[in-house]
Image (cartoon, helix red, strand yellow):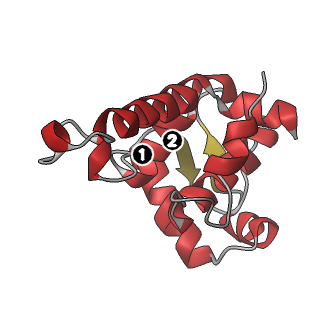
């Protein structure tokens, strides 16, 4: 499965008009790190060092992912975080929506845009939004791991 578009969407630099938030980029990196451990629990300190992200910021992201049933936390000396679903059960649309809320690149991507009736580009923007959502929906964490 070719994911060339993913390089644009998940780039850490602005490409055109779409730049995912830091929370989305780090959240994806966190989930990928946990997916590679094959259900082992990883301490937050270990993850923070491995990912080059502050422990405090990872705690925020982890809380969101835990509430969404994507990861679970275990307390104690051997505690940490682990992925709950299998990597092939987590699509990027679900993950990014959990981290960001509704994914819309701009108001033009939503049917409630007040200029939609008078805007010749509105259909283009909505089509692009649908294509991005479909791509994210069919791409799983397992797909990304296979490519790396």
Label 1 crowd bin: few (<14), some (14–19), many (20+), radius 10 Å = many
Screen quadrant of the C terminus = top right
Residue denoted by label 2: 95
Which residue is more in the foreground, 128 or 52? 128
Q: Residues within 10 Å of mark 2 (few under 14, many from 20)?
A: many
Instruction: Classify residue 114 as left or right of residue 137.
Output: left
Q: Which mark is residue 98?
A: 1
- Secondary element under disc 1, as helix, strand or loop, is helix
* Count of number-bearing discs: 2
In the image, taking residue 36 as reference, residue 102 lies left or right, namely left
Residue sticking out furthest to the right: 148
Residue at 68 percent of width and 57 percent of height: 11
Q: Compared to 44, does 133 lie above or below?
A: above
Q: Is residue 144 visible?
A: yes
In this rendering, the answer to whether 134 lies above or below 61 is: above
Which residue is at a point 55% across and 44% down the rendered structure image? 71
Q: Quadrant of residue 52?
A: bottom right
Query: Decide: marks 2, 1 in contact (CB < 8 A)?
Result: yes
């Amino acid at each position: 499965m070719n994911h060339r578009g993913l390089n644009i969407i998940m780039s850490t630099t602005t490409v055109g008009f779409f730049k995912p938030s830091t929370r989305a980029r780090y959240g994806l990196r966190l989930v990928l790190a946990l997916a590679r451990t094959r259900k082992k629990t990883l301490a937050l300190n270990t993850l923070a060092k491995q990912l080059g992200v502050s422990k405090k910021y990872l705690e925020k992201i982890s809380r969101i992912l835990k509430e969404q049933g994507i990861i679970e936390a275990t307390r104690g000396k051997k505690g940490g975080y682990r992925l709950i679903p299998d990597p092939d059960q987590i699509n990027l649309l679900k993950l990014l929506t959990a981290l960001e809320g509704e994914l819309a690149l701009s108001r033009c991507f939503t049917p409630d845009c007040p200029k939609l009736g008078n805007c010749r580009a509105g259909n283009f923007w909505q089509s692009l939004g649908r294509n991005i959502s479909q791509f994210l929906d069919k791409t799983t964490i397992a797909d990304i791991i296979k490519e790396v």
